[in-house]
Image: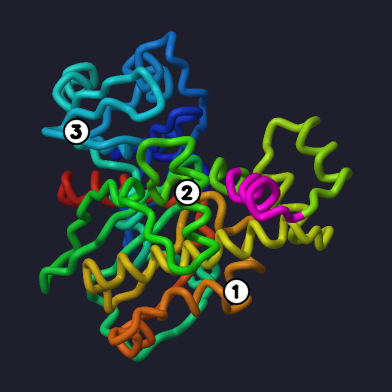
Amino acid sequence: MSRGAGAASIFAADVGGTKTQFGLFRAGPSGPECVRSETVPSDPARPFEEIARRFLESAAPTAVCLAVAGPVIEQRAAMTNHPWVLDAGDLSAALAGAPTRIVNDLEATAVAMPYLDAKRLVTIAPGAAQARRATVAVVAPGTGLGCATLYWDGTQYHPLASEGGHTDFAPRDEREVALWHFLHDRHPHVSYERILSGPGIVTLYAFLRDAIGLPESPQVRTRLDAGPDAAAVVSHAALHDADPLSTAALDLFAGILGAKAGNLALEVLAPGGVFIAGGIAPKILPKLTDGRLHRAFVDKGRQRALLERIPLYVSLEPDAALLGAARLACAAAGT
């Protein structure tokens, strides 16, 4: 993301459980342009308003939009994995009355998708020739699993929030039925998020080892015991070491992700395309482009022909939620 000096009037933030990314933007000819950005820890010991004012320094924003990791009800967000409770009215008062909007982080991510530079997108399947301005859907595996829709009303896009990552996991074959039982023994509700997330990659690895009986490499076990990011260890072992157990875990992940993306495409009817976003996808891109993901995406029986017409992409943009929030703030400011 660009940085530089200059006046700015738009304040946006991507507020996560671990870190928060702030940005000051000014209106540009093709959308908001970042003047200054900073990523800070989401410190639960400090009020969010205090951290925001420190970033703003003397800047007085004319519009504010926060993309928050959690459901937003009546412009109030109680974060899923953090004690902060954010209220648009309270934040507006803390920022000298600047109009303030709070959206789910996947809503903001969806807003950014149609405007991404081609260098920030990988086309899994081009689909049929589609009108560029049409409903799109986003699935984003990361710490959890986010979903959202961007609806085109004939004049402009509208983001629609979703907690679709928490919908019931639907097994497609005997191995996935065994996975459901493996998870149900440990959790009363088996959602897609239990699988399609960073912790989910580790769960798939454990399932294939413990329930299916695939042998574990001692070298991978040593790295898992030594490092804090087990999902990264499994992914690296699959992509760079050709470890059979890790490879099987990522293969299963890619297939279930494709099935979930196809489900969402049918549920909202997304002729404008489905975007795989979030932090995991760029890191395991070779597994998402080997055909497995798209085969699962289109494998919908009588609706296969419809899914084959829908484009499927992977987003490589790490700042999508912040950029989407900035666009929403610009719209609120009329710039």
Q: Nearer the viewer, residue 259 or 288?
A: 259
Observer-side mark, 2 or 1, equals 2
Q: Residue at x 78, y 31 (%)?
A: 225
Q: Which mark is residue 229?
A: none
Q: Position of residue 73 (x, y in %)?
A: 15, 34
Determine the CA span between mark 2 and mark 1.
29 Å
Determine the CA span between mark 1 and mark 3.
39 Å
Q: Which mark is residue 100?
A: 3
Is residue 324 in view from this perspective? no
Q: In the displayed image of the protein, which residue is found farthest to the right?
A: 219
Find numbered disc 2 in the image and state the secondary structure of the residue it sits on: helix
Find numbered disc 1 in the image and state the secondary structure of the residue it sits on: loop
Q: Residue at x 25, y 37 (%)?
A: 71
In the picture, measured across the screen, residue 208 lies left or right of residue 78, that is right
The residue carrying mark 2 is 181
Is residue 125 in view from this perspective? yes
Find numbered disc 3 in the image and state the secondary structure of the residue it sits on: strand
The amino acid at mark 2 is His
Q: Residue at x 71, y 61 (%)?
A: 247
| Residue numbers of the magenta segment | 203-214
Q: Position of residue 216 (x, y in %)?
A: 80, 49
Determine the CA span between mark 3 and mark 2.
45 Å
The residue carrying mark 1 is 289
Marks counted in the figure total: 3
Q: Position of residue 175 (x, y in %)?
A: 55, 62
Q: Nearer the viewer, residue 56 or 92?
A: 92
